[in-house]
Each structure stands twice: as C-alpha cells, then as structure tokens.
Image (tube, helix red, strand yellow):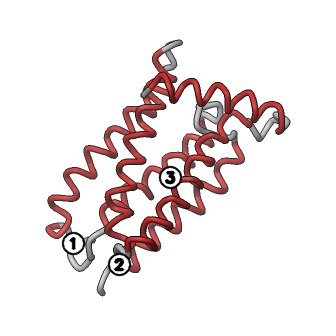
C-alpha cells in the first residue's frame, strides 16, 4: 500500500509542479492532501446519501480511517530520507489515533462530552488534527502534507467547522 501511495504522490507532485507555480507561501507538492480530502468528502457524501446512514456516526468511523491513512503517508515520507519534523508530526497523528480509541470508550464520562451524541469524539479528534496542521503550517511550512504557510487558512476553517459541529452535537 505504501509503495502505491508513494508512486501516486510522485506522479501527483510532478503534475502539481507542472500546473501550479511555487512561491514563498504556496507549495504545490502539498496539494495531494487537499485533493484527498475533497475526494474523501465526495465519496463520504455519496455513501451517506445512497445508503441513508447517519452523517455523524459514519464520519466518526470514516474520519479515523482517514487519520490512519494520513499517518501512513506521513510515516512513509519521513523515513527515507530521515525527516525529524515529519516523524514528530507522525507521532502527533498516531497520538490522535490512540486518543480517539480512548475517547470512543470513555467520552460519556467526560463533562465536555457528557451530553453529546455519537460522532462527537471523531469530530473532536479530527478537529484537533486540523488545529495541529495550523500550528505546523506556521512553524514548519515545508512539511510534506502542507501547501506552505497559506495552509493556515483552510486548516483553521476546517478545524473551526469541526469544533462547531462538536458543539452542535451536544444536547445542552
């Protein structure tokens, strides 16, 4: 799987560099992440609509699957050559996954999630991931999944929308 992912990414990097100009705030190599997110959201919307599933409960599972896929890609690009910032980001993503596993079992015990419905833990963890992407775009804009310092804008918008959805899921 990692070989196919790296092959796809290499082809994508070539195409992105051909069509988009690199600048001080925009790195086209990182567009693969946003392309994957858009494709994921389209597939998610079609599957929820077609099979009439509950939106937040499906996002809870599918979002974490996306998180594991993201961790695999970050790990693959951080090993060869050894990229310490990428390994640190991989560690953060893996900690988010472990946090999700713990939160999925215990979220009703926490006061912030006590009145929440299913789906809130996944939304909170994915929102935290996008918040960490905002910090990474500020401090390490050359990370393989970022489109440069400009990545602060879309990542912060997505983080805000996910946290707002967690707030809306609470029955306060």
Image vertical order of residue 111 relative to residue 36, above or below: below
Q: Which mark is residue 130?
A: 3
Which numbered disc, 1 or 2, marks the residue that appears first in the sequence? 1
Q: Is residue 69 left or right of residue 160?
A: left
Look at the image and tell me in which quarter the C terminus lies. Answer: bottom left
Residue bearing mark 1: 111
50 or 122, nearer to the observer: 50
Which numbered disc, 2 or 3, marks the residue that appears first in the sequence? 3
Which numbered disc, 1 or 3, marks the residue that appears first in the sequence? 1
State if disc 2 and disc 1 touch (CB < 8 Å). Answer: no
Query: Helix, strand or loop at disc 3?
Result: helix
State if disc 3 and disc 1 touch (CB < 8 Å). Answer: no
Residue bearing mark 2: 169
Q: Residue, x 59% and y 30% (percent of image)?
A: 8
Q: Residue, x 44% and y 73% (percent of image)?
A: 165
Image vertical order of residue 25 relative to residue 169, above or below: above
> What percent of the width, then of the height, locates residue 103?
22, 57
> What percent of the width, then of the height, locates residue 57?
31, 68
Res. 116 image quadrant = bottom left
Q: CA distance from mark 1 to mark 2?
A: 14 Å
Q: CA distance from mark 2 to mark 3?
A: 19 Å
Image vertical order of residue 135 relative to residue 106, above or below: above
């Amino acid at each position: 799987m990692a070989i196919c992912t790296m092959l796809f990414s290499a082809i994508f990097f070539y195409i992105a560099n051909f069509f988009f100009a690199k600048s001080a705030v925009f790195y086209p190599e990182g567009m693969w992440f946003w392309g994957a997110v858009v494709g994921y959201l389209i597939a998610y919307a079609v599957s929820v609509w077609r099979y009439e599933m509950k939106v937040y409960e499906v996002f809870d599972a599918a979002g974490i699957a996306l998180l594991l896929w993201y961790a695999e890609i970050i790990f693959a690009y951080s090993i060869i050559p050894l990229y310490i910032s990428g390994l640190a980001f991989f560690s953060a993503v893996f900690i988010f996954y472990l946090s999700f596993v713990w939160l999925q079992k215990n979220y009703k015990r926490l006061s912030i999630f006590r009145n929440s419905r299913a789906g809130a833990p996944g939304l909170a963890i994915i929102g935290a991931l996008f918040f960490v992407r905002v910090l990474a775009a500020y401090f390490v804009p050359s990370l393989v999944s970022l489109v440069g310092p400009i990545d602060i804008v879309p990542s912060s918008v997505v983080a805000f929308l996910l946290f707002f959805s967690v707030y809306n899921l609470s029955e306060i």
